[in-house]
Image (cartoon, helix red, strand yellow):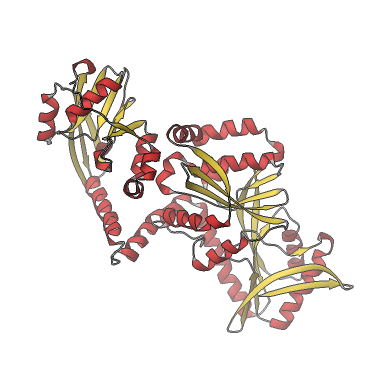
């Protein structure tokens, strides 16, 4: 580390927060926040910055000779990039400039009600938030440094099967980000916010506030609840909070993620300037680093490549790392099985289903048909369900399903589901909307179908009950038809080498 102080008549006019690495004869200079801080800068007065830059850079080059400078995180809207470029042109020093877009919300120029109305439609925030509020107690809370372990756990859980380049949960970075939360009283403060449902944190925001600017640094959430968009709900609440506090800028941080461009009102650019001394060693290193930066920039602009690297390659790395580990090998083999099943279905799939119907008035009636509605709170409080099946439960609830179980029996496999809006057969991607008052029953068993139908008949006002059965499930077909269900339609799906055809008859 090398922090250089510039004095003029014994008065400090600038700081240069550098660190350097020596490899062979070459000295590589960068800002001390390289790899962690999105934004960096020389600290000084605009009117004397040019003089300070010239003095410091000339001094380093004269002492070190073979020097490469990699100055990242310079906001285009500040004076430094232009001042530094003017110096480099004056000295006839070759350099390359690499820009990353930096979306932000100018809170001073928006009408918050109109802004949120438009964004909520765009993000389906209303539906996700409504579903959460219907099924759990939701609140946004300011959280303290004592919750950092929970924050790291959420981040690790979300990214364990993805390629994470943030380094947020590496041990060294953990210590760094944890220590930042202990800073108080200065112009820069860490703000931690959490989205809770029934006292369980499902999303967090780790951000910085500097004067009238808020920077959303890491936004994370529990992957099990992804269907509800908890990260976007929390981001919306944070935007509202910053607006009420009269902040001017809500900085969405650097990057090309699609959601940032659905939220932003303006863009800035974060610049990386790479230059070197004139020696052959330094110029060669500069050319190599600059070429590497151009390739990285092209890749990051292509969201398909970014998502492939993040999701597909990340999952491959997870399998390779864990397939021989006793505690995680089962999860790795499940990923392999899932991948092979997708290939099989792509190459060849031949599925037949029957959809049965029965007027509700014809349904059976028995006395002991008591079931309890499944809520998110039930699932969260049940360790077995919460750990292994929460994602499926959230997907069901978001898809307008209601779950029921025997009051003394709550394994996930015993929960049956009803849907009053659609018939959905996920195995063949079949969906049919109800035109009349109807109900679709799912995840039943032949031994409890009579009891379920009796319960639905008493509790639901639908005119018709629907059930689907696989064509070759003889035991289920006998159980369904013995209760008086009749065939409404048959669905046949055939896939050969990725070409699918669905026939309804």
In this view of the protein, can residue 390 be seen by the observer?
yes
Which corner quadrant holds the N terminus?
Answer: bottom right
Residue 5 in the image, given as x and y percentages of width and height: 77, 72
Residue 462 in the image, given as x and y percentages of width and height: 29, 19
Choose between 213 and 302: the one closer to the eye.
213
- Using the image, determine if residue 119 lies above or below residue 256: above
In this view of the protein, can residue 310 be seen by the observer?
no
Q: Quadrant of residue 322?
A: bottom left
Residue 133 in the image, given as x and y percentages of width and height: 47, 34
Residue 256 in the image, given as x and y percentages of width and height: 54, 50
Q: Which residue is rendered at x = 57% and y = 40% of the image?
A: 236
Q: Quadrant of residue 411?
A: top left
Left or right: residue 23 versus residue 466 is: right
Q: Quadrant of residue 331?
A: bottom left
- Using the image, determine if residue 464 lies above or below residue 11: above
Choose between 74 and 423: the one closer to the eye.
423
- Using the image, determine if residue 229 lies above or below residue 323: above
Left or right: residue 432 versus residue 267 is: left
Left or right: residue 422 versus residue 43 is: left
Q: Which residue is rendered at x = 66% and y = 49% of the image?
A: 214
């Amino acid at each position: 580390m090398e922090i250089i102080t510039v004095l003029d008549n014994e008065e400090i006019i600038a700081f240069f927060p550098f660190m350097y690495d020596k490899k062979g004869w070459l000295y590589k200079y960068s800002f001390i926040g390289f790899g962690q801080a999105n934004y960096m800068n020389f600290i000084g007065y605009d009117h004397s910055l040019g003089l300070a830059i010239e003095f410091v850079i000339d001094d380093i080059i004269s002492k070190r000779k073979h020097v490469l400078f990699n100055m990242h995180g310079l906001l285009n809207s500040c004076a430094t990039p232009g001042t530094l470029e003017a110096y480099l042109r004056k000295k006839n020093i070759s350099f390359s400039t690499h820009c990353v877009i930096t979306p932000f919300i100018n809170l001073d120029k928006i009408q918050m009600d109109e802004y949120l109305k438009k964004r909520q439609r765009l993000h389906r925030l209303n539906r996700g938030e409504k579903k959460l509020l219907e099924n759990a107690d939701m609140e946004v809370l300011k959280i303290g440094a004592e919750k950092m372990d929970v924050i790291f756990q959420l981040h690790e859980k979300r990214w364990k099967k993805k390629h994470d380049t943030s380094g947020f949960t590496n041990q060294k970075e953990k210590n760094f980000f944890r220590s930042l939360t202990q800073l108080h009283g200065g112009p820069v403060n860490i703000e931690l916010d959490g989205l809770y449902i029934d006292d369980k944190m499902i999303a967090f925001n780790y951000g910085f506030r500097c004067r009238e600017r808020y920077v959303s640094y890491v936004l994370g959430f529990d992957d099990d609840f992804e269907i509800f968009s908890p990260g976007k709900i929390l981001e919306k609440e944070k935007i509202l909070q910053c607006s009420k506090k009269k902040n001017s800028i809500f900085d969405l941080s650097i990057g090309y993620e699609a959601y940032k461009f659905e939220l932003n009102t303006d863009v800035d650019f974060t610049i990386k300037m790479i230059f070197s001394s004139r020696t052959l060693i330094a110029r060669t290193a500069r050319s190599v680093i600059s070429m590497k930066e151009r390739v990285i920039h092209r890749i990051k602009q292509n969201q398909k490549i970014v998502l492939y690297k993040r999701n597909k390659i990340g999952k491959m790395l997870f399998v390779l790392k864990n397939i021989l580990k006793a505690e995680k090998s089962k999860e790795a083999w499940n990923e392999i099985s899932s991948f092979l099943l997708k290939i099989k279905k792509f190459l060849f799939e031949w599925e037949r289903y029957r959809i049965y119907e029965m007027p509700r008035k014809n349904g059976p009636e028995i006395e002991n048909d008591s079931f309890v509605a499944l809520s998110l709170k039930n699932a969260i409080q049940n360790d077995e369900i919460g750990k292994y099946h929460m994602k499926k439960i959230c997907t069901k609830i978001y898809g307008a399903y209601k779950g029921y179980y025997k009051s003394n029996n709550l394994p996930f496999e015993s929960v049956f589901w009803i849907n009053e809006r659609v018939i959905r057969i996920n195995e063949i991607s079949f969906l049919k909307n109800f035109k009349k008052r109807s109900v679709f029953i799912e995840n039943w068993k032949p031994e409890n179908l009579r009891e379920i139908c009796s319960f639905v008949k008493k509790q639901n006002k639908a005119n018709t009950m629907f059930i689907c059965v696989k064509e070759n499930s003889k035991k289920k077909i006998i159980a369904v038809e013995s209760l008086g269900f009749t065939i409404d339609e048959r669905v046949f799906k055939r896939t050969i080498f990725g070409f699918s055809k669905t026939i309804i008859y």
